[in-house]
């Protein structure tokens, strides 16, 4: 059984840890609000530009679908951009992402009858880099600059252009993204998204394009020119939105994890203090009994 001194040291240690986890919780809450505002603000733009690309593709029809970015690549391999965190202490954020990756690898390799070596990884985040190296999977590029917390649209555009370049070079059949979609403060889901080739317009988009091509929508200079300039912006926006959502999800997970750690430290501190008080009272009682026994012996 621990002594009074040992319990006092443990109580102090738990209190120090509690202060650290509470501070990290407050920092995570502050950053979460900032990144959440950015992620939420980027969604309407991402949705509108996606709808516009689909509409213009519907207007152009086969002329749009014949473009290289709308066709599967010449290669046999798959490129996958994985977005994880640089640091730990964020609960099950990274482990959920890696479980999703493992499940996808099994299904993807079975469907296409290929080996895992035919999937090349483009990595954003130190944790994913460490995991993939441990699994001995092929890392085509590890992106370290800028750090995910410092991401802006220009940096996301560079990532998007590099993925477009490797796809256009004929090395890969397709390019996908694995990121964590932010849904709420307590819900964030690892998600796969198709990046290249660009998905063809749906039947509704084609019908909408047919209906509006001769209607009140004025396209200047023309649909083809707008489409050619818009597709790169659309791809850059998709990467930027995926990085922002992953970053927001990371801090939401870290905030929740640090809150749980703070609550656990509080409960542990209470239990230790109760044990400390009982043991201290026992020692006081024993000392009183010794004094009384000594007094009786003197008599």
Image (cartoon, rainbow, N blue to C red):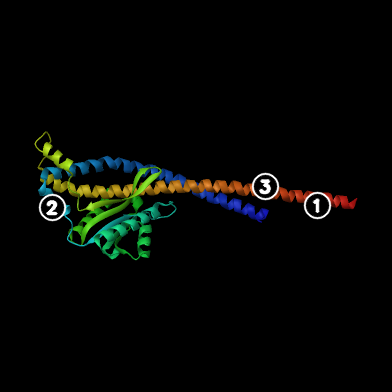
Q: Nearer the viewer, residue 23 or 218?
A: 218
Q: Quadrant of the N terminus?
A: bottom right
Asked whether residue 152 appears in the rendered view, the answer is no
Residue 277 shows which numbered tag? 3
Give the Cα distance between marks 2 and 3: 76 Å
Judged left or right of residue 219, residue 21 is right
- Residue placed at 72% from the left, 49% from the top? 282
Q: Could you tell me residue 7's position as x and y percent? A: 64, 53
Judged left or right of residue 218, residue 157 is right
The number of numbered badges drawn on the structure is 3
Provide the residue designation for mark 1: 290
In contact (CB < 8 Å): disc 2 and disc 1: no
Q: Nearer the viewer, residue 110 or 286?
A: 110
Provide the residue designation for mark 2: 67
Give the Cα distance between marks 2 and 1: 95 Å
Q: Residues within 10 Å of mark 2 (few under 14, many from 20)?
A: few
Residue 79 shows which numbered tag? none
Q: Could you tell me residue 5's position as x and y percent? A: 66, 54
Q: Residues within 10 Å of mark 1 (few under 14, many from 20)?
A: few
- Residue placed at 24% from the left, 52% from the top? 195
Q: Could you tell me residue 11's position as x and y percent? A: 60, 51
Q: Could you tell me residue 27's position as x and y percent? A: 44, 46
Q: Nearer the viewer, residue 83 or 111?
A: 111
Q: Earlier in the sequence, mark 2 or mark 1?
A: 2
Disc 1 secondary structure class: helix
């Amino acid at each position: 059984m621990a002594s009074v001194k040992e319990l006092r040291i443990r109580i102090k240690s738990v209190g120090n840890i509690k202060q650290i986890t509470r501070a990290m919780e407050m920092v995570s809450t502050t950053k979460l609000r900032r990144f959440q505002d950015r992620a939420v603000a980027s969604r309407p733009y991402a949705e509108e530009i996606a709808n516009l690309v689909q509409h213009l593709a519907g207007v152009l029809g086969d002329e749009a679908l014949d473009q290289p970015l709308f066709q599967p690549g010449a290669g046999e391999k798959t490129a996958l951009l994985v977005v994880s965190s640089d640091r730990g202490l964020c609960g099950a954020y990274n482990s959920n992402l890696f479980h999703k990756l493992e499940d996808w690898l099994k299904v993807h390799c079975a469907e296409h009858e290929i080996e895992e070596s035919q999937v090349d990884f483009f990595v954003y985040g130190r944790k994913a880099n460490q995991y993939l190296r441990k699994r001995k999977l092929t890392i085509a590029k590890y992106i370290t600059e800028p750090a995910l917390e410092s991401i802006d649209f220009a940096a996301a555009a560079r990532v998007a252009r590099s993925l477009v370049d490797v796809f256009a070079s004929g090395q890969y059949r397709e390019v996908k993204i694995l990121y964590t979609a932010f849904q709420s403060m307590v819900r964030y889901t690892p998600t796969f998204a198709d990046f290249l080739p660009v998905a063809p317009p749906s039947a509704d988009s084609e019908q909408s394009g047919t209906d509006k091509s001769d209607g009140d929508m004025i396209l200047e200079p023309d649909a083809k020119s707008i489409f050619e300039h818009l597709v790169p912006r659309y791809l850059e926006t998709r990467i930027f939105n995926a990085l922002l959502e992953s970053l927001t999800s990371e801090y939401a997970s870290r905030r929740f994890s640090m809150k749980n750690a703070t609550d656990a430290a509080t409960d542990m501190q209470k239990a230790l203090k109760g044990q400390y008080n009982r043991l201290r009272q026992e020692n006081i009682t024993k000392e009183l009994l010794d004094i009384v026994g000594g007094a009786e012996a003197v008599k």
